Image (cartoon, rainbow, N blue to C red):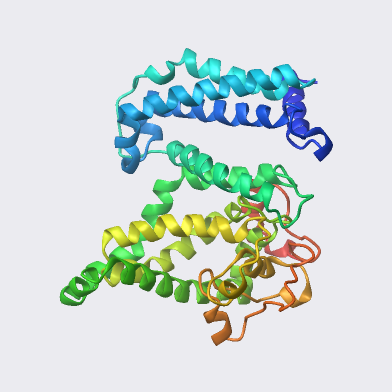
Amino acid sequence: MNPIHETRLKLRRELEAPPALRKFGSGWISGVLGMMLGLAALGAVIMMRFPGVFVMKESAALVAHPGFRTGMMVLMVLAFLFAMLSLLLRPSKVLGMTGMVAVLIAVTLGGSQAQAVAPDMTPLYFGLDFFVLRLLFTGFLFIPLETIFPHREEQGIFRYEWREDLFYYLVSSMMVQVLTWLSFMPAQTLFAITSWTEFRAWVAALPFAVQFIAIMFLTDLVQYWVHRLFHRIPALWRFHAVHHSAQAMDWIAGARMHFFEILALRSTTVIPMIVLGFSQGAVNAYILVVYLYATFVHSNLGWKFGFLEKLLVTPRFHHWHHGIEKEAIDVNFAVHFPLFDKLFGTHHMPENGRWPEGYGIGGHPVPKGYWQQFLHPFKRKKQS
């Protein structure tokens, strides 16, 4: 067997180890932390070496800040220590060695003192910085929460098809420039051909909290109907079925979404924000919150929210949208406010606190793997 392939299989077996082999003191937790932090450090060094290729304009100042280099040093030291601890505690050394090798490569490439080696030749870039920062932030926020307060205790961090969903996460992050440009183009075109100067000035002058809540309400109204159309029109459902093919729900499951569905959903939901003239600060705040909120509603959190479940979308509410039971078909389309589902007759939230028994699509007709799922909507004759 190819040594690289053999190492990859060993690494996968270690990450997906049963609960008995993942207990505190087994070296598994330190090995995973060492690997994740080591790979993040390596990604950060690549960003610093090629900022014109892997750094977004919005985060260029952050990457160039001296504090970023200090954080890089802390990241590499922590990765090294966790990897070393795993090597000492765990019989299998693959997790610790992966973290250690990632740190050594990062140091070899310059570490926290890495300098750019290529000029910024074009305005095009891939969002490696977005992937690393997004993964670290949401991962270190939701993984501990899902571990301490899980809905499905048996699921684990590296559950079924986690690699596919992580790849979706990578693709959507790396293609952030293309996705953003294409998504905002319809709204910016409408903005340019409409002359609502006074109205937009009035909207932009509203208190920040009012603008923020208004954006949430308006985008959710648009998103509700676009989402519902993706369920009701067969040609659109073939794209949306990819998202519903996930058979496990957690913080990264929401990343599984077909590239063209992302474009359709984002390009329609941003129209109210741009055309009506909301301030850039309110728009940016909403974009940040919606990233976190989408992660939250897909997460494997078993929290009970009581009265809040009637006002805001919670994980249990959205899990019913992904449920495999008959009662879960075509319900709970809203992303922020269950009010829309109540108004339009698609609300489903069992009063006894019951959750779906499983997730996915009956018969699981969507193939496995990113590229097979990318092509799936175009293979009409093979649809179930």
Camera-side residue: 374 or 354?
Answer: 354
Residue in the picture at 44% in, 18% down: 111
Q: Is residue 339 left or right of residue 384?
A: left
Instruction: Tell me residue 291's x, y (percent).
Output: 48, 55
Q: Is residue 195 left or right of residue 358?
A: left
Camera-side residue: 269 or 112?
Answer: 112
Instruction: Tell me residue 107's x, y (percent).
Output: 48, 15
Q: Residue furthest top?
A: 108
Instruction: Tell me residue 231's x, y (percent).
Output: 62, 73
Q: Is residue 39 left or right of residue 185?
A: right
- Give the answer, above or below, for where 159 lies relative to 260: above
Q: Give residue 215's quadrant in the image.
A: bottom left
If the image is split into quadrants, where does the N terminus sit? top right
Residue in the picture at 43% in, 68% down: 269
Camera-side residue: 165 or 111?
Answer: 111
- Give the answer, above or below, for where 102 lies relative to 373: above
Q: Taking the image as drawn, is residue 50 in sight? A: no
If the image is split into quadrants, where does the C terminus sit? bottom right
